[in-house]
Amino acid sequence: MPQLDSLPAPVEAALTRASVQPDTIRIAAKSDVNDDGTFGASWFLVTETELIATDGNGSVLRRIALADVKGVRSESVVDGGLIVVRAENDSMDFLRYSNATAKKLAYVTRYLEEEMEHRNGKRDIEPVWDYEAEKIDPITGLPIKEGELGYTTWAKKRQAMMRVVGYLAPYKVQAAFMALMMVVGTVISMVPMYFTRVLIDDVLNLNAAAQAVADDEKLNFLSRIFRGFPSAAMALAVAIGCLATTYLITHLIEILRGRLGAWLTLRMSADIRDQLYQKLHSLALRFFDKRQTGTVISHITQDADRLQSFLLDGLQFLVVEVLMLFAIGFILFRMNPVLAGLILIPVPIMIFGARWFWKKVRNLWHQAWRRSSKLYDVVNDSISGIRVVRAFGQQKDEIERFGVANREARDYNLSAEILWATYFPILGMSFQLGTIIVWYWGGLDVIGNGMSLGTLMLFHGYLGMFYGPLRHISPIINWASRAMTAAERIFEVIDSEPEQLDDGSLVDLPDIRGEVEFRHMTFGYESHKPVLRDVNIHVKPGEMIGLVGHSGAGKSTMINLICRFYTADAGNILIDDVDIKKIRLDDLRRQIGVVLQEPYLFNGTIAENIAYAKPGATMDEVIQAAKAANAHEFVVKFPDGYDTEVGERGGRLSGGERQRISIARAVLHNPRILILDEATSSVDVETEKKIQEAIDRLVKNRTTFAIAHRLSTLRNANRLLVLDKGRVTEMGTHEELMEKKGIYFKLVETQRKAAEIRSQSQVVAG
């Protein structure tokens, strides 16, 4: 068993002085909280004979012989946890830790607890050390969270961009044609500006120096052509025709590029959405437990939309602007290197100013968005609870609360708008500085006959085209950064571990008999906080097991594990002597039926909801299932019968009707293992009777696990399993458990007394 953390030499030396030999230490786990609750190093050590807590220097704070330890547990406290060691007569707070080290230290305590149970004969197998340390990013040194790519920010964004580009693979021909059109379009878009020089110097003959040129060798190819026309009017007509043609070609290419870009982008984003949605249905429920429903939906909607928007508009614009920047820069330096160098003077101001501005304004917009969101929350909260507000006379406080939120939203939005209104005139001044430089130095060159007026106007026109990308490059990069952040979130989902990995060892189990066994099974929704501990039960095919216990005892967790919504942290669950983790999920889920306390109906007809368990079921099969569930009687009373729309989440039906539709769905599914989770709660007595009759028919010849709030509904169970604080404390028939006078006996007595009180209250009311 490896030590979790390596002991520094000073700590080892201090332990040696305290008569603790480092080579006797079996487990060394570092914490990050001092005894007084401040941050600092401390150590939890397990030697062959002792438990020891030290400070960061190795000074022993507490130690206790293992022979005197009766139990070790982790307790959650604010922002962390506490290792508590129980001795014969008392308990001691042994070591503190923060949430950053909670998983590691809580795992150690769980392992020690299982080891002690094994030593004392309460556990017949030794605990297995299977702790996996957190993965650390080699560049940042920070822990890599589940699903993260594990690189620095820019590296992750580059990888995200490359993965997005990878979705072009099925459309590589169209993508290549798109790239070609971008290059061609960029080149052609610069041609009209060149004709400006031709019009001024060679057609309109406004430059005296150009008129005086006698040597044709000094003229370029186009100049010779246009000066060869018999009249200036004809030359003007041809030049304007060429100019119009280039404009037409430019716009045609832009139309074609836009249409092809939309075709490519929408297919790429649809492919990403498809892959994302398919992956969501393959993920374990642990993934959804850690995220709000709105967050998961936002991956498919907002994140995908943000990425699509950038691919559709931003990416094309970015590529074209960058191509334009380099092409115009090349031309300017070919035309006049000195003047081109001078116009670069304002560029650092533009670049660094833009970086500062977008960073500042993005933060302000984010704060403004949060304040606006808070403002809407206040309005929604107040209006939704308007009756409570009026009942307690809190209108004045609610108005004040709205006023504070409204002023905060106003101030942050105002700061953002003021910054925006200030920055762009300053940016415009930077552009004008470049224009002034061109007019002055270029003008001097024209006066000195070194440059024609047409060339100066051409240079001036290209200057505007050169500064344009610089103006837009920063917001586009910011746009790209937000889009790649959205892509990272999408890829986090896509890269998450699926519910079941097929490594070639999965077992086909098309016909389950229904034998279920838990062997030393331990599980927690957070692995270091067990909900069920060392559970051992063996259920024979066709047996009905009632799960009993207080709220939070682990009843629903147990059936979640049988359905393999989660996998055990330790031990095994076996179905027909096969580890549940090795059974193909399709085979397992096809033969498990679930009737929940709050049945979920999809927005559709009654017939569609019943047939959901068996796509392609005939109408006769649906009706037979409804009759078995005592649902047929009320269904046929609806004007539309089985074609009645149930509404969102079944809202048009009563709770009892929804429950019977859910039971009909389970009947049609015809499972070998049946799960009943509080199937008769929250309904009236008459409805409960009908539901119970349907359940009695449903459980025949099936292995059944039933949770019931009313213990009387478990009268047909072969055995009752009593859970308390995650452990199986009692097991047997109703009569056997009543004789023990334990937890089950107390639960029955409590319900009996509550029933008597309700009965007396009804008599008094009557």
Image (cartoon, grey):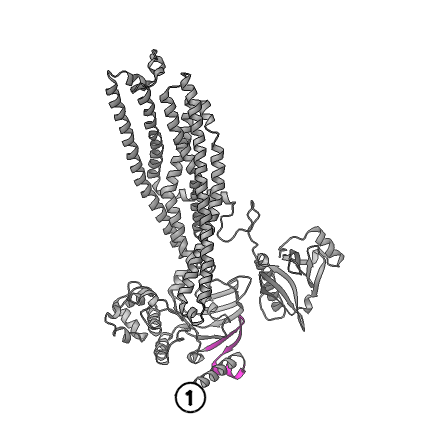
Local crowd at mark 1 within 10 Å, few (<14), some, or many (≥20)?
few
Q: Residue at x 59, y 71 (%)?
A: 122
Kind of residue at badge 1 = Val
> In which quadrant is the C terminus drawn?
bottom left
Which percent across, then down, holds residue 528?
55, 62
Q: Residue at x 55, y 47 (%)?
A: 137
Which percent across, then down, holds residue 267?
33, 46
Residue furthest front in the image: 396
Residue furthest top in the image: 214
Residue assigned mark 1: 764
Which percent across, then down, holds residue 491?
44, 49
Which percent across, then down, holds residue 266?
33, 46
Q: Nearer the viewer, residue 159 or 738?
A: 159
Q: Nearer the viewer, residue 703 or 371?
A: 371
Q: Residue at x 29, y 29 (%)?
A: 246
Residue 319 seen: yes
Describe residue 480's horizontal placement relative to residue 26 as left or right: left
Residue 378 within the magenta-colored segment of the rendering: no
**Displayed quadrant of residue 656:** bottom left
Residue 723 within the magenta-colored segment of the rendering: yes
Q: Residue at x 69, y 68 (%)?
A: 67
In magenta, the rendered stretch is 719-742
**Displayed quadrant of residue 257:** top left
> In which quadrant is the N terminus drawn?
bottom right
Q: Is residue 661 above or below residue 263?
A: below
SS class, disc 1: helix
Q: Nearer the viewer, residue 513 or 279?
A: 279
Residue 168 seen: no
Total count of labels: 1
